[in-house]
Amino acid sequence: MNNKKDVGILGLGVMGRGLAINILREGFSVSVYNRYEDSEKDVVSSFLKKHQKKEKLSGTTDISLFVLSLSKPRKIILMVKSGAVVDDIISTLTPLLDKGDIVIDFGNSHYLDTIRRGKNLKKYGLHYLGCGISGGWRGAKFGASIMAGGSEIGWNSISDILYKISAKNPNGKACCNFLGFEGSGHLIKMVHNGIEYAMMQSIAEVYDFMHRGMRLSNDDISSIFSDWDSENINSYLINITSKILTFRKENISLVDLIVDKSMQKGTGKDFSICALQYGVATPTITEAVNARFLSNIDRSKHIKYSSRKNLKNIDHKESIIVSSLKDSIYCSYMSAIIQGIALIEKVSSDYLWNIDIQKVLSTWEEGCVIKSSILNNLKNDLNHGNLFDVFLKNVHESKIHNLRSVILLSSKYGIPMPVGSSALSYYLSLSSVKLPSNLIQLQREYFGSHGFEILNDPGIINHLYNENT
């Protein structure tokens, strides 16, 4: 009797366990393996014991037996931390695999690492997929957004499983797509995470404005966020924010007890570095990354500097209507999404990946952290205009007016809003008839003879250098 399993899960952290349960629920058989045989040897046995009635589940702490437990072509999903660990596992797996087997990295690997790994495994006749997955442990267990890239043969072999375990949009379509070759799937996930940083920071800034500036209670702010989510933003992050603001610990709001330091795993920083390398302006997302760095400055410095200013209450006569705050989030969301898509288009063009932005947006419809109706609106509009036309159409003057009001008041009352401010500057820069870059070019010419262009006179000239010689 053939007892080989359909797919293997390597790594039984919370995500790996959730994914295994999801795959089993969809009728496929699963073999599991956890690499730490000493300190965490009981992980596999505990998981098997908990799900002992699952006839289609097996597991081992021996990687050779794990590989042998899978039907060919073998499909092995890596659920481990990104970085050197992935290379270590691949080097261990490679001699155990046969030509045609498929390795799928579900971690947050850098897309350049995925390209390198895919090319290396191809030499051995192995197929490699880099799959970005969003939705946290709930998504892994109940349906996530899956962004796949790499070997098309590998994709065709496992796509039926990935489609079934992914989230579904209201029309029942899977939020799972093959988006291109090599590292395209992990590129899309990196961009997703960059947008996520900006969305989270924009919500936090508006929360800070209402809580410290307007002196609204956490319960009041929770209700406001709940109202916004039921209106036209329909954002996963706003939805969960409305919930977590009601959490209590010993009858005190949990959020008020948490140290105000924002941690990160590096994908936001990777996004900003990538954008700089490709010359794509992504200020809204980069400001969100910077905000996390600023939050980690030594606490004594924050206290020292805060003593130099007293935060005043926003006078009720001057307090802006709640819809203006909502529009500041809307504009920040829109700016971040547009900037993320611009980076995807640039990298895709340079690598000749031909990534379909419509597919990207449909992948983000459900199951992912950045889910929002704003994405759906963009999906429709991008069929009828280029990226920046769509941005300027959606961020129209009334919303910008409200955002400007928010930023003016935040500055007046000492409440930092770096993402909101950046979204405003991004809009103003795109919609300005003229930017002061002409002065910068002349400065560059003066000290470095870098040249400049004259209006209606094509070609670079070095006016000052020629005069001085």
Image (tube, grey):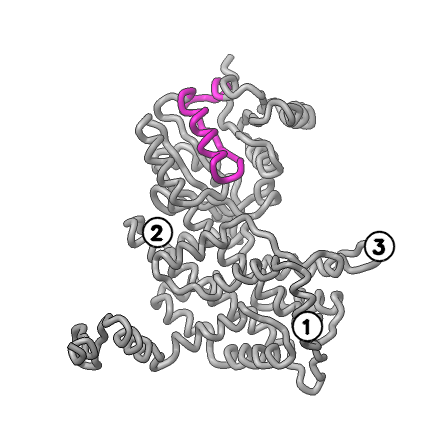
Magenta highlight range: 67-96
Give the crowd class for mark 3: few <14, some 14-19, many >=20 residues within 10 Å. Answer: few
Is 230 drawn above or below residue 348 in the view shown? below
Q: What's the residue at 38%, 46% (across, down)?
A: 184
**Residue 177 spot, x, y in % from top left:** 42, 46
* Residue on which the image places disc 1: 210
Give left or right: position of 136 versus 381: right
Q: Amino acid at mark 1?
A: Met
* Residue on which the image places disc 2: 355
Q: Residue furthest front?
A: 469
Front residue of this view, candidates 391 and 193? 193
Q: Amino acid at mark 3?
A: Glu
- C-alpha separation, residue under disc 2 versus residue under disc 1: 40 Å
Q: What's the residue at 32%, 35% (across, down)?
A: 119
Is 108 drawn above or below residue 454 in the view shown? above
**Residue 388 spot, x, y in % from top left:** 37, 69
Q: Nearer the viewer, mark 2 or mark 1?
A: 1
Q: Secondary structure at mark 2?
A: loop
Q: What's the residue at 33%, 76% (across, down)?
A: 440
